[in-house]
C-alpha cells in the first residue's frame, strides 16, 4: 500500500512539473495544475509516511525509479522510518503550501510566468522528497544537486531585482561548497564499504580508522551544515529565503534546511557508529552559538521575511543542540538518553517546519497586501486582515516556545535532555549541559521579544503607511493553508504523545530504543518523577480558570460602561502614526546591551545654519554587518579573486597555448602511469 | 576531630568560602569606592569567621591570632584608613575600568573554573574535606585580574588586599596545623605596611598630578 | 476529588493573599521612609474600585487589548497552581514543573507586551520593549538557578524539588542553594519590577517599565492586570521561600499540619517581603543600561551555584 501511495505521490509532483510547463501560457490553468498536483502528492505522501511509521514492520518499500545503465548508479527509492518521518514533514507542508499557493500565485498572474513557478515549486517538492527517499549515495547526491538547482530557480524567480539575483548566486556557490564536502565524505565511506548503497554504510564507523572517521564527520558537518544554515556557514540563508515567493520561502525555511538535519541524523546515527566525545561537544556548541546569534540578528531586522529567515538559523541551532546532546550520550553509552535527545530534536524539526511555514505564509499574505517587506511601514493590519493576524499570532506563540503550543513541547524536551545530561559524566564537560540550557533560555526569551516586535509592529497599533492602511484580507485558499498549519501547531502542542508514538520505529532503528514518555496526556522524561508536563492539562485548566475573571466582571462590573476614545498617551494630544514605537526602536535596548557583538555602525549627518543645536535637516543611518561577513567571507572573497587574477594569465586566448596545455597534461599523465 | 564534607562545621566553612567568592565578584562589578571598601571589610569578616570555625573545631588556638589580627587590621583599621583616604581625595567612583562589568564577571567566572581545575589534584591534602583551596585560588586569580582591570590606585590597593585574603585562605585551608603562624602573621604585616605606604603614595600622586589614574604614571618616564 | 479541593483552595489562597502582600510591602516601605503610607489592605479597595469603574478603550486598540488581561490573569494563576504553597504537593504539579512555570509567566508577559503596543501610544511601546529586553536577560540567570536546584533534586517537578530540599540539615548551608538563592533573589526583583530595576511607584513615564505598558488600561482590565502582578509576586516569593527555607511545610494533608504550615508560610513570606522592602529603600533605581550588569551578577551567581556542585562535593 505505501508502495502505491509513494509512486502516486512522486508521479503527481512530476505531473505538476509537466503541466506547469505545458500550461506556461495559460496562467489560470497552470495555477490550478500546480496547486492541485502539489495537494494530491502531499496527501499521498502523508499517507505513505504514516503507513510506514504506524503500520506493522513489514517489508520495506523499495523500488527503482528508472532502470539504470551505469554501474553504481541506481535510481533507488527506499522508505525507512527516518526517511518516512521527513517525508511526512515535506508532504504535510506540501498540502498547506499548495493550498496557499492557489490564492497567492494570483499576484503573479500576467506579470510573471505562473507555469514556471508551479513547475519549480513542484520540482523542489519532488527533489526534496527524493533526497529523503534515496537509497544510495549516488542518487542522493543527484537529488541533492537538483534540489539546490530548483531552489536557485525559485530564489531568483523575481530576477528583475538585483537582490534576488545576488541571493541566488550566493545560494548556488555556498550550496556547491557543501556538495563538494558531501562528495568527499561519501567517497570516504565508499572506500571502506565498496558500495554506494546506504544499506552497506550501516554501522560502518567501526571499520574506519579514527582519523578517517573524524575527517568524514567534519566533511559531513560542513556539507550538511551549509544546507542547514549553521553559523558561520549561514550567510546565504538570510539573503536567499526572503526573496523567493512566500510559499517557496516557507518551503525553503521549513523543509529545505531540514535536509541538512536529515543528512546529519542519517550519517551520524546510522553510519558512523559510536562517536568520540568531541563530535557531540562540537555539535552542541555550534547549535548553541547558532541559536543565540540567529535570534540576536533576527531582532535587529525590520524586514519581516529576513527576520523569519534568521529565526530559521536559531531553530536549526536548537535542533542541533538536541542532536549534539544525543551524540554525547551515545559516547557515554546512555542509549535511552540519546533516544530522548534525538526525539527532542526531531520533534523540534517537525515543529519548526510547521510554525516557520505558517509564519512565512502569514508574512507572504502581509507582503502581498502591503507590497513591502519593511515592518516600519506596516501596522494596524489586525483590523484589516484579522484572520491572517490570528494565524500569525499562533505561529508567533509557537515559535516563542510558549505553552501550550508545539514549540514549547519540543523545547521542553530539549531542556530535559540537557538537564539529564548533567548526570551522564563526572568530568567538567557536564557543565556544558546546563550552561547551554541557560543559553537556550536566553534564546527563547529573545525569540519572544522578537515576536512581540514582529507581531506588534506589523499587526497592532495604527498603520504607518498608505499601503498598510489600504490592505485587504488574504484570499480564502491562502487562509485555508495558514489555518491548516495553525491547527497543526495546536495539535502538536496539545497531543505530543501522538508524535512520540510516531517516532518509536525511527528511534528503534537508529538507537535501538523505543521510549513511551507519555502516560495519558502527560509527557515525562526518562526518569520516574524526573519531570512532567501536560500541555493539554495546561490548556484545559486555563479554560477552567477563565470563569474567575469573567465572574468578577459579572459580579462587580455589570453596571460599568465601556467607552471607545482616543488613546490617552499621558495626555499628549494629536497622536500620529509617526509617534508609534518603531521596530528599530523596539530592539534598541537589545542592540545597546549586545553592542560588543553587533558593533552597529551609525552615521549622523546634520545640516545647520549657525548653530549645531538647531539643525535644519538630520539624517541618521545605522546598520549592522555580521562579523562573519567582514572577518571571514570578505577576506576569503578577496583571496579567491586574487587567485583567479593570477590564474588568468593561463587563459592566454591563443589556441596554441591550450593545445600545449592539453599535450603537457597528457604527457604528465603518461609518465605518471609508468 | 575528623571532618567529613557533610558535617556542620564543614558546611559552614564552604558556605562562608562561597560568600567570600561572591563578594569578590561583587567587587569586580562595583564602581563606588566606598562600597568596595565595605565589601572588602565584609569579605575579611567572612575570612575571620572561617578561621574561627577552624580554630574552634580543630583545636588550633594559634589560629585565633589570625582571627584577631584580621578583625583588628582588615575589618576595622584598613577599611577605616582607606575610607579616610577616599574622603580626603574626594574621588568616589572608579570611572572607567578597562573591561565592562559583564565581561569582567564572565572572566571571573572562568577564573573560578580555573581555580577549581588547578586545585583538584590537591584536594587530598586538605583537612577541611572540601574545596576551600579552589576558592582561595579563585580569589587570588580574580584579585590579580581586579588589579589589572582598575585604573585608580585605591581600587588597586583593594584588589591587592583581596589577593591577600585569598592567600590567607589558602594557608588556612591547606594546613590547618601546618603553616607556621609566624609566616601568616608576617604576611599580614607585610601587606599592612604596603597598604599604608601605598596610601601615602596615592595621596602624593593625587597632589602632584591631580589624578589617581595610574595609566598617567607612564608620563613619568623621560 | 482531593486534587480538586486542593486546586480550588490554592487558587483562592493566591487570589486572597496576593493583594495583602503588595499592601504590606507598600506599607512597610512607607514606614521605612518615615511616611505613614497606605493601609495594608488598601490594594483590596483599589481592586474593588477598579472593578467597578467604567472603562475607556483606545480607538486604535484591537481584540488583543481586551484579551490580554484575561490571558495574563489565567496564565499567572495557572503558574501559581504549579508552585507548592502550604503542602509539598502542588495541585497541578503533574501538569508542569519549573519549565512550564517559567513558560506560563512568559506567556503572560508576551501578551502584556502586545497589549502595550496595541494602543499606538509611544509610551506603551517603550514599556513593552524594555520589559521584553529585561525579561530576556533575566531569563538565563533564572533558568540556570532553576537548573541548579533541579539537578540537586533530580527533577524539574517543583514538588520533588521541595522534597529534596527538605532533607536533613539546613538547605541554605549548601553553597549551591545559597548561591542559587542569591541569583533568584535578584531575578525576583527584576521579574516583579522592584526598585533597583524598575520603580513600581513611579510617576515619570520615561522611567517606567511595567507601568508604561498599562498606561492605557482602566477599569476592570486594570484590576485584572494589577491583580495578576500581585499574584506573580506572591508566587515567585513563595517559590523562593519554600525551596530555600522548606522548614514547616506540610507533607500530609491533615488540617492541623496544613494550618501550621500556613502560618509558617505567611511568616516566611513576610520575612522575604521585609528583605525586598529593605533592598528597595536602601537602593536607588539603576539606569536602564546598568540593569544588565546586575542581571549579569545574577547569572554568574547561578553559574557559580552550578559550579559549586563541583567545588564542594
Image (cartoon, coloured by chain):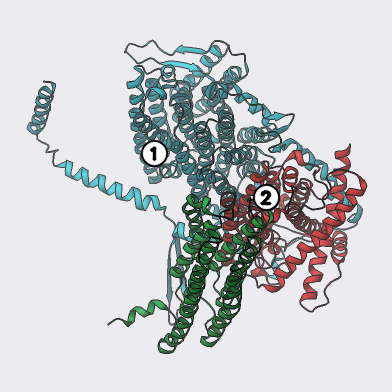
Chain colours: A cyan, B green, C red
Secondary structure of residue under mark 1: helix
Up/down of B194 relative to C80, above or below: below
Where does label 1 land, which residue? A171
Residue C38: image location, x then y, percent:
84, 71
Q: Nearer the viewer, residue C178 or A661?
A: C178
Q: Nearer the viewer, residue C309 or A556?
A: C309
Residue A340: image location, x then y, percent:
59, 32
Where does label 2 land, which residue? C106
- Left or right of residue A248, residue C129 in this image: right
Residue A55: image location, x then y, percent:
62, 15
Q: Is residue A440 visible?
A: yes
Up/down of A516 relative to A66, above or below: below
Q: Residues within 10 Å of mark 2 (few under 14, many from 20)?
A: many
At 90% from the left and 52% from the top, the residue drawn is C259
Q: Is residue A372 visible?
A: no
| Quadrant hosting residue A530 | top right
Amino acid at each position: 500500500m505505501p508502495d502505491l501511495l509513494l509512486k502516486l505521490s512522486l508521479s503527481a509532483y512530476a505531473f505538476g512539473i509537466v503541466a506547469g510547463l505545458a500550461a506556461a501560457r495559460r496562467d489560470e490553468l497552470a495555477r490550478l495544475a500546480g496547486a492541485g498536483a502539489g495537494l494530491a502528492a502531499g496527501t499521498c505522501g502523508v499517507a505513505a509516511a504514516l503507513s510506514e511509521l504506524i503500520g506493522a514492520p513489514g517489508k520495506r518499500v523499495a523500488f527503482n525509479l528508472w532502470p539504470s545503465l551505469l554501474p553504481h548508479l541506481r535510481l533507488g527509492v527506499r522508505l525507512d522510518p527516518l526517511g518516512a518521518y521527513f517525508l511526512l514533514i515535506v508532504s504535510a507542508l506540501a498540502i498547506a503550501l499548495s493550498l496557499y499557493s492557489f490564492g497567492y500565485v494570483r499576484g503573479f498572474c500576467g506579470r510573471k510566468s505562473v507555469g514556471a513557478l508551479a513547475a519549480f515549486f513542484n520540482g523542489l517538492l519532488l527533489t526534496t522528497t527524493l533526497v529523503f527517499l534515496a537509497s544510495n549515495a549516488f542518487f542522493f547526491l543527484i537529488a541533492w544537486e537538483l534540489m539546490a538547482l530548483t531552489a536557485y530557480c525559485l530564489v531568483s524567480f523575481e530576477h528583475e531585482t538585483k537582490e534576488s539575483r545576488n541571493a541566488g548566486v550566493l545560494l548556488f556557490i555556498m550550496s556547491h561548497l557543501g556538495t563538494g564536502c558531501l562528495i568527499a565524505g561519501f567517497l570516504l565511506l565508499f572506500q571502506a564499504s565498496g558500495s554506494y548503497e546506504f544499506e552497506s554504510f550501516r554501522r560502518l564507523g567501526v571499520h574506519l580508522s579514527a582519523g578517517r572517521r573524524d575527517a568524514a564527520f567534519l566533511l559531513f558537518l560542513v556539507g550538511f551544515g551549509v544546507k542547514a544554515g549553521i553559523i558561520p556557514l549561514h550567510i546565504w540563508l538570510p539573503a536567499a529565503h526572503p526573496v523567493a515567493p512566500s510559499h517557496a520561502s516557507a518551503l525553503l525555511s521549513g523543509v529545505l534546511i531540514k535536509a541538512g538535519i536529515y543528512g546529519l541524523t542519517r550519517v551520524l546515527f546510522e553510519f558512523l557508529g559510536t562517536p568520540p566525545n568531541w563530535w557531540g561537544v562540537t555539535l552542541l556548541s555550534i547549535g548553541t552559538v547558532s541559536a543565540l546569534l540567529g535570534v540576536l540578528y533576527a531582532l535587529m531586522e525590520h524586514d519581516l521575511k529576513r527576520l523569519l529567515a534568521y529565526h530559521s538559523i536559531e531553530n536549526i541551532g536548537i535542533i542541533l543542540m538536541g542532536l549534539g546532546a544525543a551524540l554525547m550520550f551515545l559516547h557515554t553509552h546512555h542509549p535511552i538518553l540519546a533516544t530522548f535527545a534525538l526525539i527532542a530534536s526531531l520533534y523540534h524539526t517537525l515543529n519548526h517546519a510547521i510554525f516557520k511555514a505558517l509564519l512565512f505564509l502569514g508574512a507572504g499574505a502581509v507582503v502581498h497586501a502591503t507590497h513591502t517587506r519593511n515592518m516600519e511601514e506596516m501596522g494596524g493590519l489586525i483590523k484589516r486582515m484579522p484572520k491572517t493576524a490570528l494565524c500569525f499570532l499562533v505561529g508567533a506563540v509557537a515559535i516563542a516556545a510558549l505553552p501550550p503550543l508545539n514549540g514549547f513541547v519540543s523545547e521542553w524536551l530539549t531542556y530535559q535532555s540537557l538537564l539529564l545530561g548533567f548526570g551522564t559524566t563526572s568530568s567538567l564537560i557536564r557543565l556544558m549541559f546546563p550552561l547551554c540550557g541557560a543559553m537556550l533560555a536566553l534564546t527563547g526569551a529573545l525569540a519572544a521579544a522578537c515576536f512581540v516586535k514582529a507581531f506588534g509592529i506589523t499587526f497592532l497599533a495604527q498603520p504607518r503607511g498608505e499601503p498598510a492602511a489600504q490592505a485587504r484580507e488574504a484570499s480564502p485558499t491562502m487562509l485555508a493553508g495558514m489555518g491548516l498549519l495553525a491547527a497543526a501547531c495546536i495539535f502538536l502542542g496539545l497531543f505530543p504523545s501522538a508524535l512520540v508514538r510516531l517516532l518509536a520505529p525511527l528511534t528503534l532503528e537508529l538507537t535501538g530504543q523505543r521510549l513511551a514518555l507519555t502516560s495519558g496526556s502527560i509527557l515525562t522524561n526518562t526518569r520516574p518523577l524526573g519531570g512532567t508536563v501536560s500541555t493539554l492539562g495546561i490548556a484545559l485548566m486555563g479554560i477552567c480558570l477563565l470563569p474567575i475573571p469573567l465572574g468578577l466582571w459579572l459580579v462587580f462590573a455589570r453596571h460599568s460602561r465601556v467607552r471607545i476614545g482616543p488613546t490617552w498617551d499621558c495626555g499628549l494630544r494629536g497622536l500620529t502614526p509617526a509617534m508609534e514605537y518603531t521596530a528599530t526602536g523596539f530592539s534598541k535596548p537589545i542592540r545597546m546591551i549586545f553592542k560588543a557583538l553587533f558593533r552597529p555602525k551609525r552615521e549622523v549627518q546634520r545640516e545647520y545654519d549657525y548653530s549645531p543645536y538647531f539643525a535644519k535637516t538630520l539624517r541618521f543611518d545605522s546598520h549592522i554587518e555580521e562579523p562573519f561577513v567582514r572577518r571571514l567571507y570578505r577576506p576569503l572573497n578577496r583571496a579567491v579573486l586574487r587567485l583567479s587574477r593570477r590564474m588568468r594569465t593561463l587563459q592566454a586566448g591563443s589556441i596554441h597555448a591550450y593545445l600545449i596545455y592539453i599535450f603537457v597534461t597528457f604527457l604528465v599523465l603518461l609518465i605518471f602511469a609508468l | 576531630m575528623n571532618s567529613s564534607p557533610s558535617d556542620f562545621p564543614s558546611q559552614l566553612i564552604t558556605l562562608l568560602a562561597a560568600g567570600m567568592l561572591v563578594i569578590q565578584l561583587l567587587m569586580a562589578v562595583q564602581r563606588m569606592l566606598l562600597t568596595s571598601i565595605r565589601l572588602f571589610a565584609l569579605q575579611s569578616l567572612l575570612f575571620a569567621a572561617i578561621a574561627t570555625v577552624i580554630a574552634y573545631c580543630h583545636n588550633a588556638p594559634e589560629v585565633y591570632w589570625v582571627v584577631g589580627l584580621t578583625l583588628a587590621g582588615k575589618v576595622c583599621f584598613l577599611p577605616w584608613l582607606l575610607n579616610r583616604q577616599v574622603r580626603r581625595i574626594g574621588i568616589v567612583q572608579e570611572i572607567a575600568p578597562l573591561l565592562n562589568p559583564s565581561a569582567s564577571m564572565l572572566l571571573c567566572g572562568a577564573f573560578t573554573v580555573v581555580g577549581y581545575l588547578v586545585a583538584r589534584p590537591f584536594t587530598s591534602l586538605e583537612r577541611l574535606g572540601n574545596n576551600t583551596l579552589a576558592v582561595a585560588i579563585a580569589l587570588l586569580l580574580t584579585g590579580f585580574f581586579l588589579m589589572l582591570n582598575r585604573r585608580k590606585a585605591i581600587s588597586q590597593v583593594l584588589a591587592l588586599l583581596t589577593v591577600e585574603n585569598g592567600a590567607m585562605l589558602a594557608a588556612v585551608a591547606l594546613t590547618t596545623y601546618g603553616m607556621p603562624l609566624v609566616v601568616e602573621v608576617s604576611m599580614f604585616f607585610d601587606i599592612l605596611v604596603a597598604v599604608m605606604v601605598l596610601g601615602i603614595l596615592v595621596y602624593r600622586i593625587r597632589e602632584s598630578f591631580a589624578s589617581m589614574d595610574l595609566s598617567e604614571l607612564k608620563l613619568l618616564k623621560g | 476529588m482531593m486534587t480538586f479541593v486542593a486546586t480550588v483552595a490554592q487558587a483562592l489562597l493566591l487570589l486572597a493573599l496576593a493583594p495583602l502582600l503588595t499592601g504590606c510591602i507598600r506599607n512597610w516601605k512607607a514606614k521605612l521612609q518615615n511616611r505613614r503610607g497606605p493601609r495594608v489592605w488598601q490594594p483590596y479597595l483599589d481592586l474593588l474600585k477598579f472593578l467597578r469603574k467604567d472603562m475607556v478603550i483606545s480607538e486604535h486598540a484591537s481584540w488583543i487589548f481586551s484579551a490580554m488581561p484575561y490571558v495574563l490573569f489565567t496564565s499567572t494563576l495557572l503558574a501559581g497552581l504549579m508552585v507548592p504553597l502550604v503542602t509539598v504537593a502542588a495541585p497541578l504539579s503533574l501538569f508542569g514543573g519549573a519549565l512550564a512555570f517559567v513558560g506560563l509567566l512568559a506567556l503572560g508577559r508576551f501578551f502584556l507586551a502586545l497589549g502595550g503596543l496595541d494602543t499606538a501610544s509611544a509610551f506603551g511601546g517603550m514599556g513593552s520593549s524594555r520589559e521584553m529586553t529585561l525579561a530576556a536577560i533575566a531569563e538565563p540567570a533564572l533558568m540556570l538557578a532553576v537548573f541548579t536546584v533541579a539537578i540537586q533534586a533530580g527533577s524539574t517537578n517543583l514538588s520533588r524539588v521541595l522534597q529534596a530540599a527538605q532533607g536533613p540539615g539546613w538547605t541554605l548551608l549548601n553553597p549551591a542553594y545559597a548561591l542559587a538563592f542569591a541569583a533568584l533573589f535578584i531575578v525576583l526583583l527584576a521579574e516583579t519590577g522592584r526598585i533597583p530595576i524598575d520603580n513600581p511607584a513611579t510617576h515619570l513615564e520615561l522611567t517606567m517599565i511595567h507601568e508604561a505598558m498599562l498606561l492605557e488600561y482602566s477599569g476592570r482590565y486594570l484590576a485584572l492586570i494589577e491583580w495578576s502582578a500581585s499574584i506573580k509576586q506572591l508566587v515567585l516569593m513563595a517559590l523562593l521561600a519554600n525551596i530555600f527555607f522548606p522548614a514547616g511545610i506540610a507533607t500530609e494533608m491533615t488540617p492541623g499540619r496544613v494550618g501550621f504550615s500556613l502560618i509558617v508560610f505567611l511568616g516566611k513570606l513576610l520575612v522575604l517581603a521585609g528583605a525586598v522592602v529593605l533592598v528597595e529603600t536602601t537602593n536607588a533605581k539603576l539606569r536602564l543600561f546598568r540593569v544588565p550588569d546586575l542581571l549579569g551578577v545574577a547569572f554568574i551567581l547561578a553559574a557559580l551555584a552550578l559550579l559549586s556542585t563541583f567545588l564542594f562535593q
